[in-house]
Image: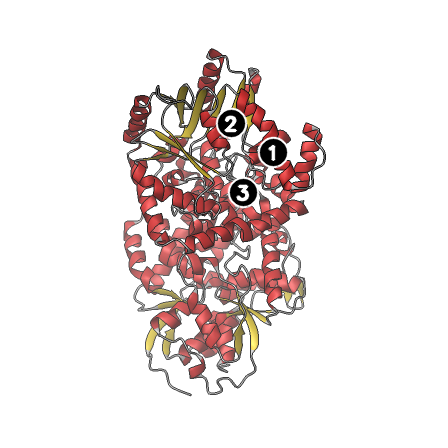
Amino acid sequence: MTDNPAHVQASLFVTCTVDQFYPEVGESTVRVLRRLGVELDFPSAQTCCGQPAFNAGFWSDAKPLARRFLRTFRDKPYIVTPSGSCASMVRVFYSELLRDEPELLLEANEIGPRVYELSEFIVGVLGVTDLAALSGNAGATPGRKVTYHEACHLRRELGVTTQPRTLIRSVPGAELVEMVQAEVCCGFGGTFSVKYPDISGAMLQDKIDFVRDTGAEAVISCDSTCLMQIAGGLERQQIPVRPMHLAQLIDEGLGLS
Amino acid sequence: MKPRTKEFNQQAAVALADVKVQASLKGLYDGFNQAREKAAEATPDWEAIRQRARAVKAHTLDNLDYYLEMVEASVTRAGGVVFFASEAADASQYILDLARARDVRLVIKGKSMLSEEMGLNQRLSEIGIEPVETDLGEFIIQLADETPYHIIAPAIHKSREDVSSLFHDKLGTPRYEKAEDIAAEARNRLRDKFVRADMGITGANFVVAETGTLVLVTNEGNGRMCTSMPRIHVAIMGMEKIIPSMEDLGLFLRLLIRSATGQRISSYVTTVTGPRRDEEVDGPEEFHLVIVDNGRSRMLADPDLREALYCIRCGACLNACPVYRKVGGHAYGWVYSGPIGAVVSPILTGLPDAKDLPYASSLCGACREVCPVKINIPRMLLHLRTQLAEGGGRPGMKKVSLAERLGMKAWRLTVTNAFMLGLANRVGRMAQAPLLRGGRLKWLPPPLSRWTKYRDFPRISATPFRARWRRYLKG
């Protein structure tokens, strides 16, 4: 094992979905970041970034949550989150939400650039592109085929497309098989999935079909809400493809757990 | 055209249940969408071109009064007549009056979405004038008495067999099997109309302010016939279609055509400046340009929605949209469909009735990614949503249901702070306990049954992350 010299201090914004539904994704995120030399803290006052209310049009409900987020993470040098969508909310959409609140807006514009989605933090800030080099048993495990679903906000709001793929390819024992239409929405879309279940369900079916066509054992994404939708469909149809967050893939690949 | 934006859910269900329609909608990804992608990749400086075009659009709309006057002056100089219509009905009336005054019996028409907005065909028919659509897709739609399914491909939802049957039923033709035979039949029938028509009505892809030039982009050549064969040519344009100068045209043609079909250039690009001049042998005796507002100035006045007027109607956002590719064009209930329709239709026809349109999007942003003029459609959908949820200070605008409102308040309460989150966790776990099957939720009561209709739901964790952090992760 090589030591990573990063020694970066960062705060984890775990997201409400991971906290309540997928705590194991949060655990993997912690183990991976620590393995990469990050000194991590978890501000316990955090709850939700406010995106569900913002996207549904309830901006006055979203605002106090934005205020809370900004207060909680005000002095942190780096804020890392295992979600492209929540990172987008803070970095991109807070300026829209808070445009009539000059003080908060100022704060949002100041904090926004310090918020990173996990894969862009690992590649962009820590400068890590080869995870196999960190692993003692690089190449030892037989390759398992995995495919990658691009989360919409991660791709289109943050412009993150190559980082997750670079990391997946460098995870020991993982072989990336691209699905067709990897960049097409899985149909989640927050309240959209409940307001228009038939449309959302039809979009999900396409995604499931494309995942299946790859023959992959696992479908990887950087957002737990996409995975909630995809996993929900896979489970319902009893399709043995494992939905995995990128953090879990790295965690397992490096044998951290 | 009478808006049917209220019927979004019913019309979406119709499309979702139609296997043939689903197949043709699915084809839009590998068809138009991939063709656009390839064309964009093959165009040097594609990004720079988009930026430039966007800047031109912003500039033109910021100075629209100036450019409208310039159009009027240059068209008049070229021998044409300009009419400004504030409502669709005024525009139709002008054309009807003109047709009556010139004893027009037969009108041939080029493809125009604005004409659909105006319901022009119906108005002409009412006074005994026969309007004939000459774009093949529009010809099919007119025959079927339907509205366009797609901005650039109005009959995209109809298979070859559908069209063959339609021709058989309505025109008494044999049941053609080959697309070529269907097209030849339409061509034969249209030829006679082209020759006999008294008036041609076309839309406008662009109007160049400096020269008063009308620009039409087609693949069938029918647009050019409409502008040149009848003795009167009337062009109708939404007031946002202006570009300042000929120098800008190359930029916009590259963007429009590549984004629409992936072609480098369409089969025909027609430019028309005024009617036939004395020394010329071809062309109409009269040229009229009808410039229509019909709600567009409301868009112009709203800084959050103004960029919807940048749209050059290429249809790329429809092809890229995973929702459009499921619900199809008729679900949107008015002339414009897909992502741009979800913005434009509510503004032009009334947001309260069109309340489903801004919400029927996963906000994935594929539309913005492909838009040749980089219109931020998701952002406008969000603005329309907040008007519907919170009223935007205008009466009658709050249209989100009480159930949804209460649901949002309840959720909002659970994420107030860490204590409330802990409490919600306990309450949630008690509620889910009797419903758990193999660690998952396969059924939930309404409204969450809308989730479990297609998907299992994960259970709320007994040891959420924050507890794990406290207990053993903190280190």
Distance, label 1 to label 2, CA atoms, is 13 Å
In the structure shown, which secondary structural element does the residue marked by tag 3 occupy? helix
Of A15 and B305, which appears nearest the observer?
B305
Of B406 and A252, which appears nearest the observer?
A252
Closer to the camera: disc 3 or disc 1? 1
Q: Chain of mark 2?
A: B
Distance, label 3 to label 2, CA atoms, is 47 Å
User: Which residue is identified by label 3?
Assistant: B402
Residue A91 lies, in percent from the top left, at 36, 58
Distance, label 3 to label 1, CA atoms, is 43 Å
- Mark 2 crowdedness (10 Å alpha carbons): few <14, some 14-19, many ≥20: many
Are dots 3 and 1 in contact, CB under 8 Å?
Answer: no
- Mark 1 crowdedness (10 Å alpha carbons): few <14, some 14-19, many ≥20: many
Q: Which residue is drawn at the image coordinates 66% and 66% (left, top)?
A: A239
Of B169 and A196, which appears nearest the observer?
B169
Q: Which residue is drawn at the image coordinates 36% and 67% (left, top)?
A: A79
Give a yes or no on whether discs 3 and 2 share a subunit. yes
In the structure shown, which secondary structural element does the residue marked by tag 1 occupy? helix
Going by the numbered disc 3, the residue's amino acid type is: Leu
Q: Chain of mark 3?
A: B
Going by the numbered disc 1, the residue's amino acid type is: Ile
Q: Is residue B108 above or below residue B332?
A: above
User: Which residue is identified by label 1?
Assistant: B140
Q: How many marks?
A: 3
Give a yes or no on whether discs 1 and 2 share a subunit. yes
**Circle number at residue B109:** 2
